[in-house]
Each structure stands twice: as structure tokens, then as C-alpha cells.
Image (tube, rainbow, N blue to C red):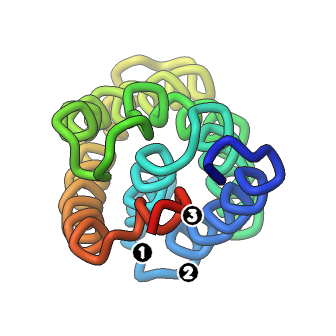
Amino acid sequence: MRKNSGIYNVVIAGLFAGVIFIMTAYFPRIPTARGYIHVGDAAVYLAASILPQPAAAMAAAIGGFLADAMSGYMIWAPYTLLIKACLTLAFTARKDTIMSGRNMFAAVLAFPITAGGYYLAAWIMTGNAVVSLAEVPPNLFQAGGSIVLYMLFASCMDKAGVKTRLEGNA
């Protein structure tokens, strides 16, 4: 079974890091006061639903970090590295499908992880808890939009048997 192959997982994680980077940095973005809203988290959730945990966390952290670093938001990049890795923790790749009950629950957990993580990052950067509250609504919107896109992608990928094919069972 390929899913246990270290090299195979590194390659798939690298591909996901690239997809996360592109979907975060180059897909349509909505500028906010201190950052931007993107749909790259949908790819983070997909990576976490397909790859083993360490590989998913690395793909999410690297893809998100590079997107911030290369699109003029380097100040956010170290926080993004941690937040994106944390987003992968609740997901599982052990189920037969991407859209498992646990992964749906994990997608819901993305709301507080994303909004709370960037709120804390803004608080650290500004030193002001009240001003940092401005980060919460855009990040809730970002998490929600990414969840919808994740569910759409995951549903299509499950119908096409992508996870079974990636695991070498097809």
C-alpha cells in the first residue's frame, strides 16, 4: 500500500504545499485592513483528509507561509505557519473517504482555529486586544468559504474515487 511510503507522502505533501500556495496567493483574494481573505484553506483541509498528519501539517505550514512571504505579508508568515499546521490536527486520513463525519466536524473546528489564531497573532503584533478583534469577522468568512469549497471538492473527489486511487487500491 503506497500511503505508508515515506517518499510518496513527501511528494504528495509537496504537491499540496504548491496547491495551498497557489490557492492562497493567487486565486481571487479579498483585501482586508491588515491582510486578505482567500480560499487556500480548502486545500489545507483536503491535504489533512488525504495525507498522514505530519505530512499534512508540513504541506499546510509551508504552503501558507510561502503565500504570505511572497505576496507582501511577511509579518503574518510565522503565525500562518503555526495556524495552518494546527488546522490539520483534527482531520483524519484514516477513513475510506475524504468526507467522513470526523472531517466534517474538523472543518467546523476550523472556525475557531482560524479566527482565534489570527486574533492572537494580531494581538501579539499590535499589543491591543480590542483593535485585534477586527481580525475575527474576515477570518470567520475565510474559514466558511473554504469549508464550502472543501465540501464541494471532497464530494467530487470521493465520487471519482481519488482517495482509493492515491492509496493504490484501485
* Three-letter code for the amino acid on which mark 3 is drawn: Ile
Three-letter code for the amino acid on which mark 2 is drawn: Tyr
Q: Quadrant of the C terminus?
A: bottom left
| Residue beneath disc 3 | 20
SS category of the residue bearing label 1: loop
Disc 1 to disc 2, C-alpha distance? 7 Å
Q: Name the amino acid type tagged 1.
A: Arg
Residue positioned 29% across, 27% down in the render = 112
| Number of the front mark, 1 or 3 | 3
Seen at 27% across and 38% down, the residue is 103
Q: Which residue is mark 1?
A: 29
Residue 133 as seen in the image, left or right of residue 168:
left
In terms of depth relative to the viewer, which is nearer, 38 or 42? 42
**Crowding near the residue tagged with mark 1, few <14, some 14–19, many ≥20 C-alpha atoms within 10 Å:** some
Question: Residue 105: x percent and y percent?
Answer: 19, 31
At horizontal 22% and vertical 42% (from top left) the residue drawn is 100
Tell me residue 83's x, y (percent). Answer: 54, 33
- For disc 3, the neighbor class at 10 Å (few under 14, some 14 to 19, many from 20) is many
Circle 2 is placed at which residue position?
26
- Distance between mark 2 and mark 3 Cα atoms: 10 Å
